[in-house]
Image (cartoon, grey):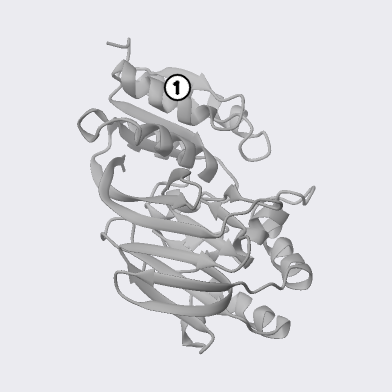
Amino acid sequence: MPPHHTKLIINPNADVGNAWRRASDLRPVVEAHGGADWTGTVYPTHATELAHQAAEEGYERIIAIGGDGTVHEVINGLMQVPAGRRPKLGIVPVGTGNDFAHNAGIERQPELAMQRALIGSTKAIDIALVEDGHGRREYWDNTLGIGFDATINLRSRTIPLLRGFLVYLVAVFQTILLNHDAPRMSIKTDQAEWEQELLMIVLCNGPREGGAFLVAPEARIDDGWLHYASIENVSRPMMIRLVPEVMRGTHGRFSAVSLGRFRDLSLHADRPLHIHTDGEVFAGFGTDVRELKVEILPGAVELLT
């Protein structure tokens, strides 16, 4: 058995490198509650490896200290372990968007979030699994964006100086101007089937992404459903018109927008797609992914709240 019951996995580069300083301020809270073993990430997907290793070593709690990307990687590590041996998940949000933490009701204040993660109760939350046409599989916890939504994510990575929501907002307008592309998609779920030219479709476990966009207002991370929001091939002015509506979660009243829910989905597009999973690149510029299968895994992870 490990010396402590808890493993802390920190991404020191989260929040433009400020996470390391903020995490060091958490040491008194950790020590006051019995201590924990610390480890940090040094390369992409490292948190997945660390979480898997910690689970195999018998840790009871794994706490992700970082942003949405860190949580995404830790969950992918946890899901490699059978449910009976899967550690409980805690989150201390010190990233840029922290959307999943927000959707899960995690305290924004890192010290309070750490305290809750160390001594709080748990609730079972849903996780989703995506598989592309090449057989590549990945778990995700908050949103999977296809098309316009994913291109925003790709562009946000190239914007210097700005932080937080402003990064996403600038990327939104860049994408409207430079990437107005609507692949034709054939979509089948356990609830419906249709074919349409879509600027974007976002699959949602939680309601919010991008720091402020309420993409699927009805989505809940523990209701056994995934939700979707799609926008058909509208004009650039109309996309600009829809931006504040998506922020408020009122976009569903427009005829070009479709909202719904499902448990499993398959999708085929007539051209390569841009795709993100929880803000991490799943299919970027220069890739050729045209087919996806998505399913929900109800109550797959115990979240410390």
Between 93 and 181, the one lying in front of the other is 181
Q: Label 1's element?
A: helix
Q: Position of residue 119 (x, y in %)?
A: 28, 32
* Residue at (24, 46) in percent of width and height: 123
Other residues around mark 1 within 10 Å, as few (<14) / some (14–19) / many (≥20)? few
Q: Residue furthest bottom?
A: 255
Dividing the picture into quarters, in which one does residue 18 lie? Answer: top right
Between 252 and 281, the one lying in front of the other is 281
Numbered label tally: 1
Q: In the visual, does 145 lie left or right of 302?
A: right
* Residue at (72, 56) in percent of width and height: 155
Q: Where is residue 293 in the image (x, y as percent from the top left)?
A: 41, 57
Q: Residue furthest left?
A: 84
Regarding residue 67, the answer to whether it shows in the image is no
- Can you say which quadrant of the picture contains the C terminus? top left
* Residue at (61, 65) in percent of width and height: 147
Q: In the visual, does 69 lie left or right of 294?
A: right
For badge 1, the amino acid type reads: Pro
- Can you say which quadrant of the picture contains the N terminus? top left
Between 270 and 43, the one lying in front of the other is 270
Q: Position of residue 25 (x, y in %)?
A: 53, 27
* Residue at (51, 45) in percent of width and height: 68
In the depicted structure, whether residue 146 falls above or below residue 98: below
In the depicted structure, whether residue 7 falls above or below residue 242: above
Regarding residue 188, the answer to whether it shows in the image is yes
Between 46 and 211, the one lying in front of the other is 46
Q: Position of residue 32 (x, y in %)?
A: 36, 21
Q: Mark 1 points at which residue?
A: 28
